[in-house]
Image: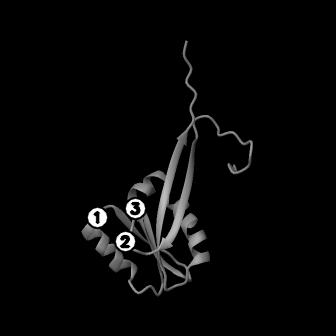
Amino acid sequence: MDLKKEGVAIPEGKKRVTVSTTFTQFSLPPVRDALIVGRKSPIGSQALYNSLEVLLKGQFKLISVEHPIIEALIVRKSDLRKVPQGKFVPLLIETAEKIMDETDCLRVDVNIEVSVTKEIAYD
């Protein structure tokens, strides 16, 4: 079901997730929600991930991808609990591949809103 169409109601008991993303050049602090690392980035994805593990142990996941421009994504694990990796990663890549080359490392700020609609019957 395409929830983008106007007038489509969210079925009872179903979740609706709205994801808003912002893509910027890599800067310090190095990451808030995600980094997208190009194949020829001056700093490799494993080195970036290892640095984050020292600073923020256990908060990020390194996700290698098969892509001509992008080597990997480093994503905050708490975001992956809200949006499944199989949906989240393609969403990030879809925009990033249009604005980066293989030498880039993009910092991504993500705003996720989870909305749940449920009807409760009572007397």
Picture layout, residue 18 above or below residue 97: above
Number of marks: 3
Q: Element at badge 3?
A: strand
Category of crowding for the residue at label 2, using alpha-carbon neighbours closer than 10 angstroms: few (below 14), some (14–19), many (at least 20): some
Quarter location, residue 26: bottom left
Picture layout, residue 42 above or below residue 46: below
Nearer the observer, 33 or 66: 33
Counting from the top left corner in percent of width and height, residue 19 is at 55, 55
> Which residue is identified by label 3?
76
Quarter location, residue 12: top right
Picture layout, residue 121 above or below residue 43: above
Q: Element at badge 2?
A: loop
**First reached walking from the N terminus: tag 1 or tag 3:** 1
**Residue type, mark 1 in image:** Leu
Q: CA distance from mark 1 to mark 3?
A: 10 Å
Counting from the top left corner in percent of width and height, residue 47 is at 33, 80
Taking the view exactly as shown, the residue that stands out farthest to the left is 54
**First reached walking from the N terminus: tag 3 or tag 2:** 2
Q: CA distance from mark 1 to mark 2?
A: 11 Å
Picture layout, residue 21 above or below residue 120: below
Counting from the top left corner in percent of width and height, residue 61 is at 38, 66
Using the image, tell me which numbered label, if any, was put on residue 30.
Answer: 2
| Quadrant including the C terminus | top right
Category of crowding for the residue at label 3, using alpha-carbon neighbours closer than 10 angstroms: few (below 14), some (14–19), many (at least 20): some
Using the image, tell me which numbered label, if any, was put on residue 56.
Answer: 1
**Residue type, mark 2 in image:** Pro
